[in-house]
Image (cartoon, rainbow, N blue to C red):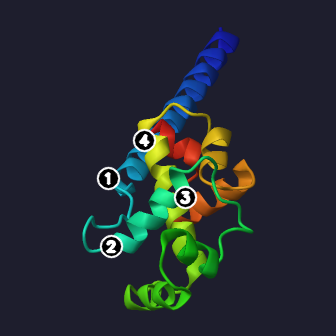
Amino acid sequence: MKLLILTNLLSLAVIAVLVAYVLKVRYKHRKIAENLPTEAPWKPEAEADEIALKVIEWMWHGSSVPSNDMLTLETVANSIGISREELAAYLKEHQHPNFRSWISSIRLQHCYDLLTTTDHTLSEIAYKCGYADLPTMSKAFKRQYGQSPSRFRKI
């Protein structure tokens, strides 16, 4: 009889722990979902940001995604038909800390868009956004949006 009571108490304890865990996971999930942006934080405005739109067009609508070697201030400026100085002035005027961070924000915007609008695998998205591999994209995405691309997609 004592063994039966002890077994029942142990079963109740296990159930209580499982319920607590499920509630904790649900709470975390809800908190993450509440803190997610409804849209990516940076998106060029159609008329006000003509240079960014040209760069986006060049990066994503060509035959292949430009590699990191191709993404220099001079190469990008030449590719969209402006001078290096004009592109540098644009970055300064729009308060982008530097060229690399600006390109990174464009790539992350593209990742965000692909994650929310396609069923591509994360590796495909990393490649399509110009990242060398998935871990590099995941690290940058987590730094920008506060969570991994896989977790973001699940929510």
Disc 4 element: helix
Using the image, tell me which numbered label, if any, was put on residue 116: 4
Q: What is the x, y in percent for residue 61?
A: 50, 50
Disc 2 element: loop
Would you say the residues marked 2 and 1 are in contact, meaning their CB atoms lie under 8 Å apart?
A: no
Residue 121 in view here: yes
Marks counted in the figure total 4
Q: Nearer the viewer, mark 1 or mark 4?
A: 4
Using residue 95 as the reference point, say whether residue 149 is left or right of it.
Answer: right
Using residue 27 as the reference point, say whether residue 136 is left or right of it.
Answer: right
Using residue 100 as the reference point, say whether residue 24 is left or right of it.
Answer: left
Name which residue type carries label 4.
Thr
Using the image, tell me which numbered label, if any, was put on residue 38: 1
Q: Residues within 10 Å of mark 2 (few under 14, many from 20)?
A: few
Q: What is the x, y in percent for residue 123?
A: 68, 41
Q: Nearer the viewer, mark 1 or mark 3?
A: 3
Q: What is the x, y in percent for residue 151?
A: 54, 43
User: What distance separates the C-alpha of mark 2 from that of mark 1?
Assistant: 21 Å
